[in-house]
């Protein structure tokens, strides 16, 4: 039996996690992230209001949390079902428009300062969505195929303004057969993959492993600043 990390296409994600409307994906949290709350002022120093990117956003409530704190939030998500559920479940309405170039459909929320680009993250260019001051990533970097991880880091970096910051939640573990996602990301991998950033670990805690074929399951929150 293969022990190589699983490779999923965006369509696989849609089928596995977003097709069945009655099933909550294992990664979705019913409340906004307590880490985002705790480290908000480190991600957005000096009370600045920012343009913030949430790559692979799913239907994360963190987008609402940041919009309610005054930020301009832009998500990127392939699964149409995730984006529509995000709006429906939070009693939000949207305008839908095809982005020029045709690779993305943009959902503009009417009630809050949130836009979600529906499409493959790897097709995104700064000319399409503009540049960002900050990124909050929980689950994007961790779930991207291991073979595309470097590309993910380059892409996210290409969308940032000088001196931007990334708040990153990652998981690492020892596998005894588990093939992800999430894939294992160590603190060393973060500083190697994001080599153009100064990287600082804010916290790293061991948690009970959610899968039986995993041990030493650890959650790490890091802040990265573009040098
Ligand atoms: C582990 S989930 C994380 C969701 C969200 N950040 C959260 O905290 O709930 C990863 C998400 O990335 C999306 N995704 C995977 N590959 C993608 C791609 N190439 N482009 C855009 N979205 C993608 C999946 O559909 C899924 O919703």
Image (cartoon, rainbow, N blue to C red):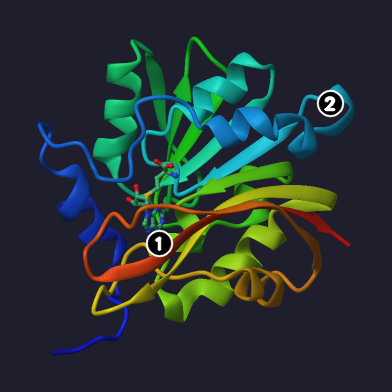
Give the residue displayed 66% in from the left and 31% down from the top. 38
Give the image location of residue 64, x and y in percent: 51, 21
Give the residue displayed 53% in from the left and 14% down from the top. 112
Give the image location of residue 155, x and y in percent: 61, 64
Q: On the rendered image, what quadrant is the C terminus found in?
A: bottom right
Q: Is residue 59 left or right of residue 142?
A: left
The image quadrant of residue 145 is: bottom left
Q: Which of 218/5 is in front?
A: 218
Considering only vertical position in the picture, is 157 above or below 38?
Answer: below
Q: Report crowding for label 1: few under 14, some 14 to 19, many 20 or more residues within 10 A (C-alpha).
A: many
Q: Which residue is mark 1?
A: 143
Q: Which of 21/106 is in front?
A: 21
Q: Secondary structure at mark 2?
A: loop
Q: CA distance from mark 2 to mark 1?
A: 30 Å
Q: Report crowding for label 2: few under 14, some 14 to 19, many 20 or more residues within 10 A (C-alpha).
A: few
Q: On the rendered image, what quadrant is the N terminus found in?
A: bottom left
Considering only vertical position in the picture, is 106 above or below 139?
Answer: above
Give the image location of residue 96, x and y in percent: 39, 27
Disc assigned to residue 48: 2
Q: Is residue 215 left or right of residue 3?
A: right
Q: Is mark 1 within 8 Å of ligand 1?
A: yes
Q: Which of 226/27 is in front?
A: 27
The image quadrant of residue 217 is: bottom left
Q: Secondary structure at mark 1?
A: helix
Give the residue displayed 31% in from the left and 60% down from the top. 10
Disc assigned to residue 129: none
Give the image location of residue 139, x and y in percent: 45, 52
| Callout count | 2
Considering only vertical position in the picture, is 193 above or below 44?
Answer: below
Give the residue displayed 54% in from the left and 56% down from the top. 124
């Amino acid at each position: 039996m293969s022990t190589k990390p699983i490779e999923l296409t965006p369509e696989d994600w849609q089928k596995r996690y977003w097709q069945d409307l009655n099933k909550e994906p294992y990664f979705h949290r019913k409340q906004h992230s307590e880490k985002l709350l705790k480290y908000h002022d480190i991600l957005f120093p000096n009370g600045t209001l920012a343009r913030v990117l949430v790559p692979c956003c799913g239907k994360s409530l963190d987008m609402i949390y940041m919009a309610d704190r005054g930020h301009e939030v832009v998500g990127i998500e392939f699964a149409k079902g995730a984006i529509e559920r995000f709006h429906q479940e939070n009693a939000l309405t949207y305008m839908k428009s095809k982005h020029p170039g045709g690779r993305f459909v943009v959902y503009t929320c009417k009630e809050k300062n949130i836009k979600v680009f529906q499409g493959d993250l790897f097709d995104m260019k700064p000319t399409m969505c503009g540049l960002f001051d900050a990124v909050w990533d929980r689950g994007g970097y961790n779930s991207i195929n291991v073979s595309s991880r470097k590309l993910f880091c380059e892409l996210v970096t290409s969308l940032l303004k000088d001196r931007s910051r990334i708040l990153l939640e990652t998981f690492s573990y020892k596998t005894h057969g588990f093939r992800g996602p999430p894939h294992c990301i160590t603190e060393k991998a973060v500083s190697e993959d994001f080599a153009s950033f100064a990287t600082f670990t804010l916290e790293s805690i061991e948690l009970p492993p959610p899968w039986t074929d995993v041990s030493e399951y650890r959650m790490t929150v890091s802040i990265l600043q573009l040098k």
